[in-house]
Amino acid sequence: MRALQVERSLPRFAAARIASRPLALRLGEADLPEAPGPDWVTLRPKLSGICGSDLATVFGRSSRWFEPIVSFPFVPGHEVVAETDTGDRVVVEPVLHCKIRGITPPCTACTAGRTNRCENLSAGHLSPGLQTGFCASTGGGWSGAFLAHRDQLHPVPAGWSDEAAVMVEPVACSVHAALASPSEADRCAVVIGAGTIGLATLAALRSLRSEVTTLIAVAKHPEQRRLSVQLGADYVAEPSELRRAVRRATGSWILDSGQLTGGADMVFDCVGSSESLVDAIAVAAPGATIVLVGMPGHVGMDLTALWQRELRLVGAYAYGPEARAGGRHSFDLAMELIASRDLGRLVSARYPLDRHCEALEHASQAGRRGATKVVFDLGLEKRR
Amino acid sequence: MTRPGFVLEVDRSTPPILTWHGEGYRLERLPPGRSRVIYPPEATEALSDPDRAIREALLNPLGDSKPLPELLSAGMRLTIAFDDISLPLPPMRRPDNRQRVIEAVLDLAAGAGVDDVVLICALALHRRMTESELRHAIGDRVYDSFAPSGRLLQHDAEDPDGLVHIGLTDAGEDVEINKRAAESDLIVYVNINLVAMDGGHKSVATGLASYRSLRHHHNVKTMRHSRSFMDPEHSELHSSNWRMGRLLAASGVNIFQIETTLNNDAFPASAAFLQKREWEWSLRDRAGFVASSKALSVMPPRSARSMFQAIKAPHALTSVHAGEVEAVHAATTRVVHRQQLVDVQGQTDIAIFGLPHICPYNVNSIMNPILVMCMGLGYLFNLYRGMPIVRKGGVAILSHPTPWAFHPVHHPSYIDFFEEVLSETTDPAVIEAKYEERFATDDWYRHLYRTSHAYHGVHPFYMWYWGAHALEHLGRVVVVGGDPKAVRRLGFSPATTLADAFEIASDVVGRDATISHFHCPPIMIADVH
């Protein structure tokens, strides 16, 4: 089968970073890994999304934090709708936690059902890897086939398009983020970033957090602005306009130094850059919660406000049972959200593996090119 | 004898025409055979002895008013209110008219033994003036006599303890004005009448009013029914102010109005070419144009702005009238019209307005995009009597760099208006209904208006309303040489050159459209028949 693979090569990662080209990625023939046990099945991807974390990896911008929890060579692709050998369509919950790794007893987090916080991402009968798509033992969605444990599979409802199904994993991340901050009446929430995760977070907040009375989105590009309004934003600001937008919404004042006297109660950073986090802290009210949704890397900033205003900075990674939704799983909530808000329309472009450079360039420039989610179409691949 | 304004029909021998472009100007060649240039009258003669003229006006009032000395007595409360930074344009050389008049009034008050005298700058909802601006307007002697003792005030339209509700007009309009002024035995109002809509009852009824009162005439409906502001008989803005002024008089508020007029001498001799007809430019004028244009083309915008804002006009006093408000203003208006009216026959398909560096609301500040709109469509478009110089459904071409730039101290609510309101709609009626109240009552804007040097939170709305009549009248607005993003936010079409603007306009008015170039400043009023 053909697959896009990432190999461990520091020169390639460095060159990719400098040239802003996916030089760490190689398209070639690859063997399907051997199944680690009887509970594993072969999946043939239909669509496989390109995520921000994938782009950071192939363009050499990923944090070295991941080094011990990935294994090379790996096939990226963790946002997948695929077919089993029996022709059933499934989406994959990619976290490779204790049970998937055959570890007993499971770690404390997995025992509590919080598999996204698993402590054993480099142990067990699989190679290190935090998720499918970062693990040499499983393969990933950017290929003709890969392996998945039965517990990772979620059936796709009848009548669903592949586009809707491929959105389940990223939307589940957004659902998890939207439910990550405390709940109080009359909240002002800000969502920074209007890519797939930002837009899905907007939709999740509007659907799952009725106490959010004012929802401000930060979007740079016209199509992002349009979708933000459609998905529930009360107001859409450009990044440079955010502070004033929050001031207006919250009745704050702007002091001479430019800081707000008040601010938003919840801020969701769906970008993960220094700039977005600086903005998030700048518009957070005293005691507010800032949720890091977009994968951050190295950031540099003044944290005085975080200290003086007693802000809470929390991460939101992956998915699991959601306490704020009665213990329902993020994937189930995501499926409801996708169906009710027609989030399959966020899939903007499909590419075959042969055009992976074009696909990755498109994905990295999605906002300015009027796109949201760019995916690989492996259906074309299977016919080869 | 100064020459009146006139209309030049452009032919092949017509030289390129000077067109203002913010802190700069360009020479633009207009299509022959279908273009005309409307030139203002030359500066009328100045009064030879301004101080003597002022004294005579105070002693020989118009209407049923007594001479000022007879209205002054020991033990009375006297309030002298005066126009703010928005007049005149550009600011005039010292001594300013206000200084001359206030000094004359104070001399008489001192002679009559009046001790309780307070000066109030009639800001309405404009920004508070700085000390240097006040010193320039009223002179160091007056400033030093009144400011240290707290007797030089700036009207605060948001001071709950400093306003008094006089009543309602027969049209249901609230009249609420400055309490100190209303409770004085006499208000002496010192005005500079730059254009016909200044002065009269507008001086007190607007300059010393609250938002509650102003909103009755500073609104979309009034602006759309003021055709134009410069023609009192057809101005709903004028009518509303007159109703309010008459209520003030009927309520016992005594006003002694002093109005002064200026001639068209707007620029210093070194820039005389700016108010000359192009074919009469001397070698020195040409050299001045070339040298200044070259310098401006390489100068950072901030430096150019500082240079232009430093201009002090050699405006000269042409008349002074004092006494009863309406009689005074009628006399003033005749003088203003004599200086500014230009006979124009018929309308054209396109009007070109070159926007200068200054408007009433960016003195020592930045002409932000909202003020560009207001200057072009609120002021220059409305400088007509009879009918606009451009036909219904025609095109206005504005020339201005229109930078996406705002003065953060002077115009804080403008920034929000531009970012929030105009990104949603440019329809004045929708803007008024959906957003005005929130901006007008915003605590932060109120705080900045009262304690800093910020225009009131509602002020950008009024700027947009000034252009409401033009927006309704025009088929398209094109801005030459503006920041495309800012121009689009205004709802207008950006063009790189005047030729491009004509091309864009041709979609609306065709390729053989007739064109008027409004050669302003200096200020004029097109009397369109």
Image (cartoon, coloured by chain):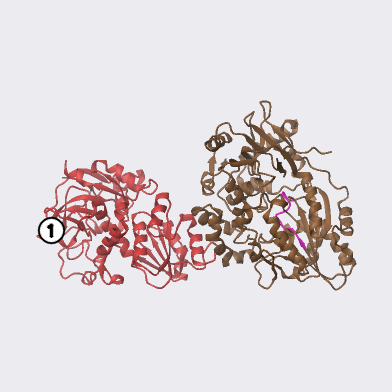
Chain colours: A red, B brown
Choose top left, top right, bottom left or bottom right for residue B192.
bottom right
Q: Is residue A87 above or below residue A190?
A: above
Evaluate whether residue B398 shows in this view.
Answer: no
On the image, the x and y values in percent for residue B32 come to: 64, 28
Q: Is residue A148 above or below residue B381?
A: below
Task: Name the residue that disc number 1 marks.
Answer: A40
Q: Nearer the viewer, residue B182 or B74?
A: B182
**Residue B299 horizontal side relative to residue A12, left or right:** right
On the image, the x and y values in percent for residue A103 come to: 16, 66
Choose top left, top right, bottom left or bottom right for residue A186.
bottom left
Q: Residue furthest top?
A: B12
The residue lying at 68 percent from left, 73 percent from top is: B161
What amino acid type should be assigned to the residue bearing mark 1? Trp
The residue lying at 68 percent from left, 61 percent from top is: B124
Evaluate whether residue B246 shows in this view.
Answer: yes
Considering the whole magenta stretch, tell me its main secondary structure.
loop
Choose top left, top right, bottom left or bottom right for residue A265.
bottom left
Q: What's drawn in magenta, residue-wise?
A: B81-91
Q: Is residue A144 above or below residue A281?
A: above
**Count of residue discs:** 1
On the image, the x and y values in percent for residue A16 come to: 32, 45
As for residue B86 lying within the magenta part, the answer is: yes
Q: Nearer the viewer, residue B226 or A116?
A: B226
**Residue A315 horizontal side relative to residue B273, left or right:** left
Query: Pointer 1: residues within 10 angstroms few (<14), some, or many (20+)?
Result: some
**Residue A148 horizontal side relative to residue B188, left or right:** left
Host chain of mark 1: A
